[in-house]
Structures are given as C-alpha cells and as structure tokens.
Amino acid sequence: MPKKILEKILIVDDDRSICEILEFNLKNEGFDVECAYSAEEALRRLPGGFSLILLDIMMGGMSGYKMAEILRTRGNLIPIVFLTAKDTENDMLTGFSVGGDDYISKPFSIKEVVARIKAVIKRINSSAPATVQQKLIFGDMLIDLEAKEVTVKGEQIVLTKTEFDLLVLLAGNPEKIRSREDIIDKVWRESPNVTERTVDVHVTRLRKKLGSYASVIINRSGFGYRFNTSEL
C-alpha cells in the first residue's frame, strides 16, 4: 500500500547528486518532492503549493540567503530549512536573520534531515500559544490570534510564524519576564539546535518590523525579555 503523501517539499541545490539523494529518500518518507537547481529557478516555481523549502546557501548565481531575503520581503512565509557546508554560529544566525526556520550542516544524515523537516512542519502547523482572547490590543497595536495577523496604526505587519508566536508569547502575559530558555521551550518546542542567540536574532528582527512599537519588547540583562506596556 503506497505511503500517504505528507507535504510537498522543494529542494533547491545546484549539486544534482545531492538533489537526487534527498529526493529519493524524502519520497520514501512519503513526501511529494520537486527539485530546482538554482535560486532563480526556484523563484520561478513559487508559489507552487510547497509546504517547505530545503535550500542550499552557496550556489552559482543567487545565494540561498538572498533568495530567502527576497521571499520574506515579498511577504512569502513558506518555511525554509537551510542546507549548507557553512557551519559556523555566525552563518547559522545569518540564516535565521533572513527568515530561515532551521539550519542543517553538510555532511548530513538523511534521518536528521527528515526529523528537522517534520519538526519545522509540525511547529508551523501547530496553533499559536493558547489564550482565551481572540485579539490582544495595546494602543494602536492589534494582535489578531484567529487571523494570525498583527497591525500597527492600521498597517499590517508581515511576520513569520516564529515571529508571530514569539510576539504572542510575550504580549499574552505583559510584564512577565521570559527567559531565553523558556522562550525556546514555548516557541521552538521540538526544533533542535536552537540557541539563546537564535532568540536574540528573532527578537531583533521582530523589533525592526514593529517600527515605532519596537520598544514594547525590552531586554532585562541576565533575565530575558518582556512585553513592556508602559511604552504604549
């Protein structure tokens, strides 16, 4: 009996042998898989009903970082898992800063790739942190928990799923200080290899998107982050 298709994955890598290995093994895991051999080709394929992009960073032509940045600038929030030989902490944080959801270093094991993909998809598809309210309103900021939208002064702010969950976690209990460990446990849950600096990168990115409301998220040195309503 054929396996049930779970999700549709787009592999983007200019190394065709790696694409073939990943495609073969991911299909055996029940995924629907397509390959693109450059970032430019991948952008032409989108949108294409994909649930996740497995994206190499170092490619001829446009880099994976640049492709991710273009997608996020366009408001495309499709989950991105970077797959690359660049494995320093700064490389990883750069991947997160341009909107990546996870980061896998080469050489990799297929089991690890499958586990990471499933963890990201599960996290993206899971509901936002529970709350009895459908909307959180702070001055001119409105967080719509049902629509998964944030507006500031009537203008919609495009957030990734991770950024939205992070904002809801902090805003859902104003003035409570959340340690980085607590934030990782609540927002990233089953995603492996998430560090405290990953939290800092996402907070910085979220603050930038909030514009004039950036100061509502403050850092208590040595303790963590909190949502500061006194700034509103």
Image (cartoon, rainbow, N blue to C red):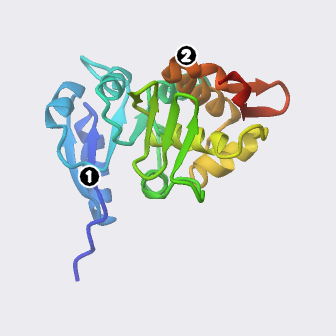
> How many circles with numbers are drawn on the protein?
2
Question: Circle 2 sits in a helix, a strand or a loop, which is it?
Answer: helix
What quarter of the picture does the N terminus occupy? bottom left
Q: Which residue: 38% across, 27% down?
A: 57
Q: Is residue 34 left or right of residue 145?
A: left
Q: Position of residue 76 (x, y in %)?
A: 30, 34
Pointer 2: what residue? 212
What label does residue 23 carry, if any? 1
Q: Amino acid at mark 1?
A: Glu
Identify whether 36 is placed above or below 220: below
Q: Nearer the viewer, residue 211 or 208?
A: 211
| 10 Å crowding of disc 1: few (<14), some (14-19), many (20+) | many
Q: Amino acid at mark 2?
A: Ser
Residue 228 visible at all: no
Do tag 1 and tag 2 residues touch (Cβ < 8 Å)? no
Q: Is residue 18 left or right of residue 81?
A: left
Q: Position of residue 128 (x, y in %)?
A: 52, 53
Q: Position of residue 26 (x, y in %)?
A: 32, 57
Give the image quarter of residue 195: top right
Q: Nearer the viewer, residue 60 or 90?
A: 90
